[in-house]
Amino acid sequence: MLDKFLAMALPEGATKDHPFTCPMGRQAPLLSSVPLPPLLVAVAENDLIRDTNLEYCDALRAAGKEVEVLVNGGMSHSFYLNKYAVDMDPTTGERTRELIDAIRSFVSRH
């Protein structure tokens, strides 16, 4: 299924190593050369790509970029999109509100 999502998201003929999905890969420009605004990166604690996301944040910082990281404790990938869980599970609902508040705060500061 992931391959289908990648095929829809990436330019025709691109692989998962494309800079859109692999910003630290061999095909990507050096992060220090990319003009980026301050970034907020939200990472779900139980996400399969959590470590990769955190490595990306470390690489951005090493490249001199301003990065804030929000780790959503106990959550999995895209937890905030499951409306049933957001509405029915107190923890998911609270983590979703924390995420929204963090985004709101970040945007208001930048």
Image (cartoon, rainbow, N blue to C red):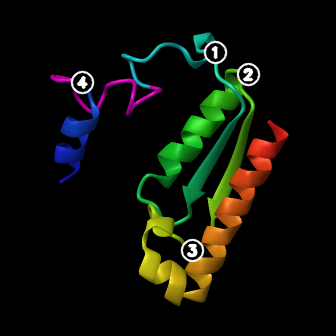
Q: Residue at x 58, y 45 (%)?
A: 54
Residue 3 in which image quadrant:
top left
| Residue hosting label 4 | 11
| Residue hosting label 3 | 74
Left or right of 34 in this view: 78: left
Among the two numbered marks 1 and 4 on one chain, the one whose residue lies closer to the N terminus: 4
Task: Please identify the quadrant where the C terminus is shown.
Answer: top right
- Of tags 1 and 3, which is closer to the observer? 1
Residue 31: x and y, percent?
Answer: 57, 19
Front residue of 6 and 17: 6
Residue 90 in which image quadrant:
bottom right
Q: Which residues are magenta?
A: 11-24
Taking the magenta stretch, the answer to whether it contains residue 43 is: no
Left or right of 107 in this view: 44: left
Within 10 angstroms of label 4, few (less than 14), some, or many (20 or more) residues? Answer: few
Amino acid type of the residue tagged 2 in the rendering: Gly
SS of the residue under disc 3: loop
Query: Rounded to the nearest whole Å, what is the CA distance between mark 1 and mark 2?
Result: 11 Å
Residue 32: x and y, percent?
Answer: 63, 15
- Of tags 3 and 4, which is closer to the observer? 4
Query: Rounded to the nearest whole Å, what is the CA distance between mark 2 and mark 3?
Result: 30 Å
| Residue hosting label 1 | 35
SS of the residue under disc 2: loop
Amino acid type of the residue tagged 1 in the rendering: Pro
